[in-house]
Amino acid sequence: MTDKPSLQDRLVAAGFGAGWAIVPRLPERLTAWAFRAVADRLWKRRGGSVLRLEANLARVKGASPDDPVIRELSREGMRSYFRYFHEVFRLPSMSAEQLLSRTNAIGDAQVYDNLARGRGVVLALPHMGNWDQAGAWFVAKGHPFTTVAERLRPESLFHRYTAFREGLGMEVLPLTGGESHTFGTLAQRLRAGRPVALPAERDLTAKGVEVQFFGSATRMPAGPGLLAVHTGAALIPAILSFKGDDWVVHFHDEIVVPAEGTRKEKVAAVMQSLATVFEKGISEHPQDWHMLQRLWLEDLEPRD
């Protein structure tokens, strides 16, 4: 039995439904202005999510959360975050031509080369830019892929978001509560020479791999490293950012699995290398890193 959704959960689900129904019907300049205005209003209120974003950005910049530079950066971050949601509501109505012409891809040849040779590819991404747009672009390039989605509350929102992503051409597996073993399905896709894309800098299970990230310890989900070690797939980090009205997808060099060591040691080494690449990408585009949650171990609330 699932918990009955709260009023807030139901309002959020209704809001998303209204967004997909209404936003594409209105002038884009008007809706973009409205989402930016909401972002600015929330930024000025300095609620818990904004304060957490500022604390996270302070770690990235090696500064105090009270630094005026961090305060200004958090405003850019909130605008970037709400741009993501604005674009999510418009994505189903965007043409493949729009996605292809407005996306600037860097280092993508290695991805296509691996897939052409029948080798699976694990694309590991931090929560940056617009990952749904990047997925739709990748599908438009002729590469449908499999991904994993966190279960959202209420359940109706999770199903609506899943349907949205499936409508863009993705295969979406639930992180928990699915009909099959998610890791096994991902491994099957990779062995068949297909791509898999996974968000990879925030562990949602408390069973992740501990890494050093901007000078402090955090946990990253083990999935990308385990899949690369287990299947021999290429593990390629991807950094997403905004550039004016367009998007940038930067594929970094493949992270090579060490030849020596136990499986646990190999996964740990791979995930630390992935964290290092993420540090570089986030440092270059901190305003597009949408991390409004606790991330570092010393910031997490104690668990039983």
Image (cartoon, rainbow, N blue to C red):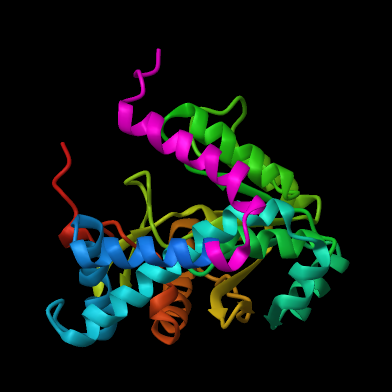
Decide if residue 48 is on the left or right side of residue 162.
Answer: left
Rendering coords of residue 207 (x, y %):
35, 47
Decide if residue 296 is on the left or right side of residue 168.
Answer: left
Pick the residue in front: 178 or 5: 5
Image quarter of the N terminus: top left
Asked if the stretch drawn in magenta spans residue 149, the answer is no
Pick the residue in front: 206 or 30: 30
Rendering coords of residue 123 (x, y %):
62, 64
Rendering coords of residue 216 (x, y %):
23, 72
Asked if the stretch drawn in magenta spans residue 24, the answer is yes
* Residue 126 visible in the current orientation: no
Q: In the image, is residue 165 above or below residue 36?
A: above
Image quarter of the C terminus: top left
| Predominant SS of the magenta segment | helix
Q: Which residues are magenta?
A: 1-30
Rendering coords of residue 246 (x, y %):
63, 78
Task: Name the image quarter holding residue 258.
Answer: bottom right
The residue under the point 70% across, 51% down is 92
